[in-house]
Each structure stands twice: as C-alpha cells, then as structure tokens.
Amino acid sequence: MSTATSTQDLEKLLSLGQLPALPQSAIALLQLSQDPQAGPADFARPIEADPGLMGQVLRFVNSSYFGFSREIGSVQQALTLVGTRSIANFALWNAVFSVIPNPKFGPFDLKGLWQDSLRRALLARSLGKRMSLSNAEDLFAGALLQDMAIPLLLKEMPEQYQELVERRASEGRRLSGLEREAFGWDHADAAAWLAQKWCLPTEFVDLIRDHTQLDELLSRGEAFRGGACVALASLLPSCTDQDWSERTLFSDGFDTLTAQHKVDLAELLTEVDEKTADFAPLLKLPVPTRSLTEYWNEESN
C-alpha cells in the first residue's frame, strides 16, 4: 500500500468517527501557550473560569510531586511558581483524558494506557532535563499524548484492533509494526492527525507523529534529541506486560542518546517510579503494581 493511499485511508477512517472536542478552557490555554507575550495573569483567566480545572490545577501544584513547603492558594501564584508551560500541559492532558472514549473489549484497559502514558511522559521529561534540553515540558506533553489515538482506533476498528492487541501480547512485537503491516499506518500517525485537528502546537504534533521512529531520530543529530527522548520512552514496558520485550532496544537507544551526557539509568528509572507514585493519584490512576526498576532488575538477572 502506498504511503499516500494509506494516509488517505486513515484520514477517512478517523473522519467517519465522532471526534471528541476539547473543552474551551484547554483550547484557550493552548492558544496562550503559542503567544510569547502571554503571562501568568493571562493563563489564570481560562483556568479560573473553569471551576473543575481550577481545582485540579491547585491539587496538582500542592501535591508531593512539587513538594512546596506551604500551600499554594491561587492559580496565578501556582502559574508563577510552577511555570505556565507545565500547568498548560497538565491541563491539556486532563482535557484529553476526559474526552477519549473507553472501548471495552478483551485485554484493553484504558486506565492501563494512561498509566503507561504517565510513566513515559515522566521519563521523557526527566531525561530531557538531565540532557539540559530546553523543551523538557513539551517532551512531557508529547509522551503523554503519544498513544491517545489507540482508544479511538479500537472503537472504530474493534475486530481488527483486538487481533493486533492480542498479537502484541502473545508475540512480544511492537504495536506500531503490526499496524503498519496491516494498514500502512500506525497509531502515531493517527494521534498526530488528531493533534492537528485540535490545533495543538506543531512541536507536539511532531513529537507524537515520530515517537515510533527512534532509530531515525537518533540518526538525525542534536536537533532531534527531544523527539528521541519521547521515542525512547515509548519502549518502556506496559503495566500489564509480564516481560520487558523491548528492553534491549531501550538500552541500546539510551546508550546512543546519552553518549555525550552523564546520565545514570538506574537513577533515572528510580526517579520516574517515585514521580509516578506522586503523580498518579492526582489523575485518579492506580500506581503501577510493578515499578520500572523491578522490570529492569528482573531482566538483568
């Protein structure tokens, strides 16, 4: 199947479904995040106009994830202390989390997908910070949203997708590879299409679209290190996996990506496990039963 034809088929499939709409508060924050002149007071207005979002933001900044010694009582103070980008990205994921459907069949578990997304986002950001990348917060959002199209595809193509999900579990293969064999496109292409329809920043669209292309990103040099962080994070095990089937790919990619940086992988995984335990309850998610450190150590023995 040609790339042009497969892309047209994907767009037709997604256009036939009823795409979820983002809340107005999230759209307003996205627009502000693209305005270099916008400050905390500008970001505070759409958050304060949405009582549910305001409560979530204040719980977020007062959590142990940030560890402030005193309670933060106002949205504008929260934006000043934590940063507009961090809070806008948190609000974005909350919005996406609330509108993505939950197709119920077979082994698929929506909360499990969000657990996986959270760990991947935390790893991408932590690694980006260790490598002194300026867009670490964007890496967090890009990794959070990289798999957001999977529930939509499951809803629109239940029989075909159930087979792929089951084959991924039984054969230990990447879902993206199975998708490309079957359809000529993968869920990264679908998520990037959805991100464009929502008018997300181009940087997010690129991070989402390229997250299954680690080798290509690594070969393209310094300018693509952020995308490589997000792609590397996609190789983490899912919470339901018995084994880390992509551990060798992850380890090799990590060594290549961090060759010019002093990054201790064991410390990185420990930090991600700790941050996940802090962050998951804010999103009403269970903490994964097996930590990344446990996966890593089990495979090492």
Image (tube, rainbow, N blue to C red):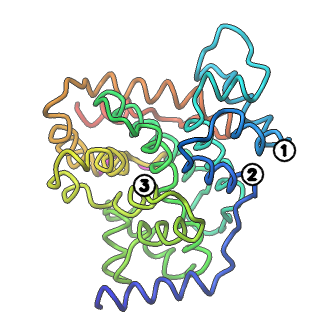
> Front-most of 214 and 200?
200
Residue 201, percent from left and from top? 50, 57
**In the structure shown, which secondary structural element does the residue marked by tag 1 occupy?**
loop
Q: Residue 283 appears at what percent x and percent y?
A: 67, 40
Reply above or below: 136 against 238. Answer: above
Asked if residue 99 lies left or right of residue 81, the reply is right
Give the overall secondary structure of the magenta segment.
loop
Which badge, 1 or 3, comes first in the chain's sequence?
1
User: Disc 2 versus disc 3: distance between alpha carbons?
Assistant: 20 Å
Please give the residue where the numbered disc 3 appears in the rendered image: 203
| Residue underneath mark 1 | 49
Marks 2 and 1, the one that precedes in the sequence: 2
The span shown in magenta is 241-245
In depth, the one of 251 and 42 nearer the eye is 42
Residue located at (71% from left, 22% from top): 77
Q: Compared to 9, does 64 lie above or below?
A: above
Asked whether the beta carbons under mark 2 and mark 3 sit within 8 Å of each other, the answer is no
Q: Alpha-carbon distance for marks 2 and 1?
A: 8 Å
- Alpha-carbon distance for marks 1 and 3? 27 Å
* 227 vs 286: above or below: below
> Which mark is first along the chain, 3 or 2?
2
Q: Residue visible at 31% across and 34% down? A: 296
The label shown at residue 25 is 2
Q: Amino acid at mark 3?
A: Glu
- Horizontal side of 213 relative to 49 (left or right) equals left
Query: Compared to 64, does 134 lie above or below?
Result: below
Residue 188 is left or right of residue 89, and the answer is: left
x and y percent of residue 153 in the render? 54, 74
Is 94 in front, or is 225? 225
Q: Secondary structure at mark 3?
A: helix
